[in-house]
Amino acid sequence: MENILYEGTVLWATDVEIRAMDFSERFLARQFSFVTPLSRHSGELCLTNKSLLIEGDEDLVIPLSHINQLYLGFDDVFSVASVKNFGLFWQPIRINYGNDLVVYLIVDYNFVGSSNKRFFNMLTELFSE
């Protein structure tokens, strides 16, 4: 039986989707107030002791056993230049899983910040057990 550890909202995109965005969509449009951060999808997120489930405009299921790497911060795909305030209030979570699949998450975004640090800490705690 799976135990629910966290539920919330999520904005997300894959590395392939972000790389396919043009300059305006990836950088310029994200600098205005009340514009969502760099993402392609939205939905509800559920973390269990076995998997990460996203239900929304597109569903995604990532078994925790398939996660190869977790990273909190900016990189060459999801850069600090693509967010307003230069990432002062939040940073994306990057999850590498399966065979070279990458997804970026923004958890419980509220136009000022997100719960990414808290969610990232929960994930890292699960892997340390």
Image (cartoon, rainbow, N blue to C red):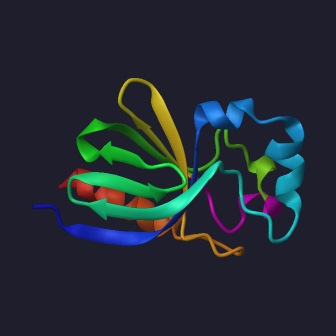
Residue 51 spot, x, y in % from top left = 27, 52
Residue 47 is covered by the magenta coloring: no
* Residue under the point 35% across and 30% down: 98
Number of labelled discs?
0
* Residue under the point 61% across and 30% down: 16
Instruction: Specify whether residue 9 is in view.
Output: yes
**Is 109 or 88 nearer to us in this picture?**
109
In the image, residue 49 sits, relative to residue 94, either above or below, namely below
In the image, residue 61 sits, relative to residue 33, either above or below, namely above
Query: In the image as oriented, which residue stretches furthest toward the front?
Result: 57
Instruction: Specify whether residue 76 is in view.
Output: no
Q: Viewed as shown, does residue 25 lie left or right of 10? A: right
What span is colored magenta in the figure?
84-92
For the N terminus, which image quadrant?
bottom left
In the image, residue 38 sits, relative to residue 122, either above or below, namely above
* Residue under the point 85% across and 70% down: 33
* Residue under the point 72% across and 43% down: 79
